[in-house]
Amino acid sequence: MKFILDGCDISFIAEAPEDITLKELLKQTDKLKPDWCACGIRSCDEDEIRHDAEVIITKDSIRLADDSVAATIKE
């Protein structure tokens, strides 16, 4: 499933398995350190759903799609 990790200064199109639990999702997203303020989650709109994910989340990992994503992953 695709969704937006959204904030006042930056947002990312994220993708995660449909069967991921909220606990698993939060464990992985807690590792994401955006370069600017990011503070929420929302559904993709019709245009956003067509774009590739910038943050890929699995039940046991999180990664950035490429170096252009304005964030880092904390270990």
Image: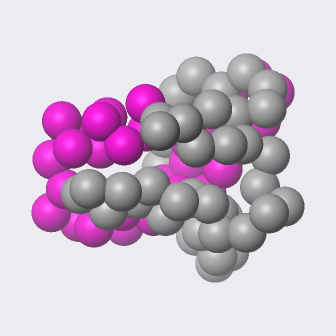
Query: Would residue 4 be found to the left or right of residue 27 on screen?
Result: right
Query: Going 79% across and 26% down the picture, which residue do you hit?
Result: 36
Q: Quadrant of the N terminus?
A: bottom left
Relative image position of residue 63 (x, y in whole percent): 53, 60
The span shown in magenta is 1-30
Relative image position of residue 57 (x, y in whole percent): 40, 59
Query: Going 21% across and 44% down the picture, which residue do you hit?
Result: 24
Query: Going 67% across and 43% down the picture, which residue do you hit?
Result: 72
Instruction: Quadrant for residue 54, please give it.
Output: bottom right
Q: Depth check: 41 or 37 in front?
A: 37
Query: Going 80% across and 63% down the picture, which residue do you hit?
Result: 67
The answer to whether residue 4 is magenta is: yes
Instruction: Quadrant for residue 39, please give it.
Output: top right
Relative image position of residue 31 (x, y in whole percent): 47, 36
Does the image show residue 25? yes
Q: Depth check: 61 or 52 in front?
A: 61
